[in-house]
Image (cartoon, grey):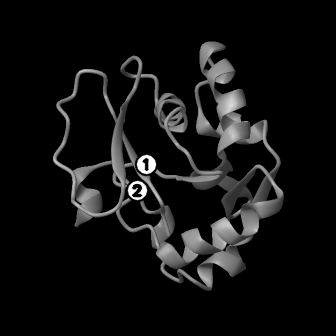
Amino acid sequence: MCDEIVVVIAPDAPTPSLPVGPRIRVARDESEGQGPLAGMVAALRSVTTTFAIVAAGDMPELQPSVLLMMLRIVADGDAVALADGSDVRPLPCVVRVERAAEIAPALLASGRASVRALLDQLRVTAVDEPTWTALDARRRTLFDVDLPGDLA
């Protein structure tokens, strides 16, 4: 599914031990505490593919079938995200690297440092819930770990 994987870490964090296998690189946030868009900017600078799957490190149950569907859909637009009720979730998403890399740094510099703000500037296809939940009935692709109890 992925030709390369970019793991973004804090500026002063020790380089983690990474598995052997796919092409994995570490990128560093330029400054700490600026949120997911800053991490995305760091990653986009080193990505060599046309599209990138963007997910947070606290999303342990991403479903490959949903991500593959998102990659198939993005071909004609700038981004794909998942509908969740009347909302569109910013993560995970798939973005056209060149377009996202043009827009994201300016958003970050202007203080609009969110992935949602980036998606607002892109042509986004929102995958409706019935479509993506047919591949992930338990909705685990949207699961994120905010508190230790979330893992129970």
Residue 9: x percent and y percent? 32, 34
Residue 54: x percent and y percent? 53, 50
25 sits left or right of 89 in the view: left
Q: As rendered, which of 151 and 5 lies closer to the eye?
A: 5
Residue 151: x percent and y percent? 25, 63
| Helix, strand or loop under label 2 | loop
For label 2, the residue is 144
Between the C-alphas of marks 1 and 2, the distance is: 8 Å
Q: Is residue 110 above or below residue 95?
A: above
Q: As rendered, which of 125 and 23 lies closer to the eye?
A: 23
Q: Residues within 10 Å of mark 1 (few under 14, many from 20)?
A: some
- Residue 112 visible to the viewer: no
Is mark 1 in CB contact (under 8 Å) with mark 2?
yes
Q: As rendered, which of 94 and 142 lies closer to the eye?
A: 94
Q: Which mark is residue 23?
A: none
In the displayed orientation, state which residue is furthest to the top.
110
Which residue occupies 65% across, 67% down?
70
Q: Quadrant of residue 11?
A: top left
Which residue occupies 77% across, 49% down?
78
Q: Which amino acid, by three-letter code, is at mark 1?
A: Ala
Which-is-in-front pick, marks 1 and 2? 1
Residue 129: x percent and y percent? 68, 73
Q: Which amino acid, by three-letter code, is at mark 2?
A: Asp
Which residue occupies 70% across, 71% down?
72
Q: Residues within 10 Å of mark 2 (few under 14, many from 20)?
A: some
Q: First in sequence: mark 1 or mark 2?
A: 1
Q: As rendered, which of 137 and 80 lies closer to the eye?
A: 80
Q: Is residue 139 above or below residue 103?
A: below
Q: Quadrant of residue 25?
A: top left
Q: Is residue 3 above or below residue 66?
A: above
For label 1, the residue is 56
- Residue 24 visible to the viewer: yes
